[in-house]
Amino acid sequence: MNRPFIGISMGDPAGVGPEVILKHLIYEHSSKYKVVVFGSKDVFEFYLERFNLAMQINSISSLDRIDKEFKEGELNIVEAGEFNIKDLTIGKVNKRCGDIAFKSFTKAIEAAQKNLVHAIVTAPFSKEAVNLAGHRYAGHTEILAEMTGVKDYVMMLAAKRFRIALVTTHVALRDVPKLVTKENVLKTIRITHSDLKKWFGIENPRLAVASLNPHRSEGGLMGDEEEKQIIPAIKQARSEGINVEGPFSADTIFVREKRSKYDCFVTMYHDQGLSVLKALYFDSSVNITLGIPIIRTSPDHGTAFDIAGKFIANHRSFTEAVKQAYRMARWKQRKNLGSTF
């Protein structure tokens, strides 16, 4: 089988994205896959010089020339758009950095849609910078959804075999209860079940669902979302043949015994699940978008403007994101899920 291409979007040039990409390619890269970066050659030349690193850069002329012009052992890059390196101020929000970060990401999506790369890994960008550049999106996932024509998607975070899917993501805590509906919980269960089979090769995924309220609401003493929304969603999913259990009280759902039993935990809101994941695997957790027709992973951290340009950024999460993308791409290859590679 041919080695899969992993496409990487550069992220914000003023953040740690270019640094963690370079560190991965120099210290962690595997011959099992090929990497092509979508971004700006000038940005990487800038950081190679700044960090006193040696790596040859190979500019690929266009998307459809990726396979033909790829050079082993070099930083292979497809220009995503014009960017003047004089506009780069490390660690600062800048609309021109936001614009090239946006274009790098959309170019990577385009390559994945054309099956020129077989998975994409996204380095972090600044949502503020992207919006200052005139691209009105809340983040990577919303751009992905629009470009792939997907309405329903799920944010899943993973570290090793520990996976957490979220019913709600980046919303205020006061808004969570009204978003915990039977429809949203069921959608999350269905998409998670389907993609664990599709991308991870788990034939009968075992899912555990968390309650929203403490102690499953104690029979209605602390809310009624379990009885009115979560339990009906679980019953419906079971009637469809999905192996799902719960709701479990969130303060005990992640005990060691359950972590070894279930393939994924469905939690109701961001901090309910991710506080535990990051406490256990802060430097190695990976963000995976489910429900879309392409493979997308990312490191579970942001632009880290405060440490950008200092060569102290930890690239472990980024490397894990690349490894996860590779594993998913290989499963796609073995199952021949619409792949030509």
Image: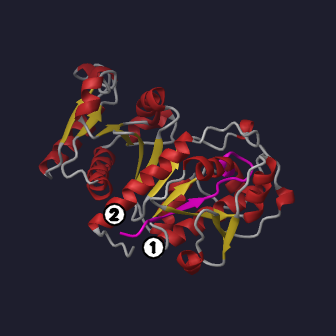
Q: Residues within 10 Å of mark 1 (few under 14, many from 20)?
A: some
First of labels 2, 1 by sequence position:
1
> Can I make out residue 300 in this image?
no
Total marks shown come to 2
Asked if the residue at tag 1 contacts the one at tag 2, i.e. Cβ–Cβ closer than 8 Å, the answer is no
Quick check: 46 above or below 299? below
**x 83%, y 60%: residue:** 85
Which quadrant does the N terminus fall into?
bottom left
Left or right: residue 285 compared with residue 101: left
Q: Which residues are magenta?
A: 1-18
Local crowd size for mark 2, using a 10 Å CA cut-off: few (<14), some (14–19), many (≥20): many
Q: Which mark is residue 115?
A: 1
Q: Nearer the viewer, residue 222 or 258?
A: 258
5 in magenta: yes
Judging from the image, what secondary structure is the residue with disc 2 in?
helix
Query: How far across and down, in percent of the image, does residue 124 sit?
Result: 61, 49
Label 2 belongs to which residue?
332
The image shows residue 107, relative to residue 302, as above or below, that is below
Q: Is residue 111 left or right of residue 17?
A: left
The kind of secondary structure element at disc 1 is loop
Counting from the top left corner in percent of width and height, residue 220 is at 25, 23
Nearer-the-camera pick, 330 or 268: 330
To which quarter of the image does residue 178 belong? top left
Q: How is the image coloured?
A: secondary structure
Identify which amino acid the numbered label 2 is placed on: Lys
The C terminus lies in which quarter of the figure? bottom left
Give coordinates of residue 115: x percent, y percent. 45, 73
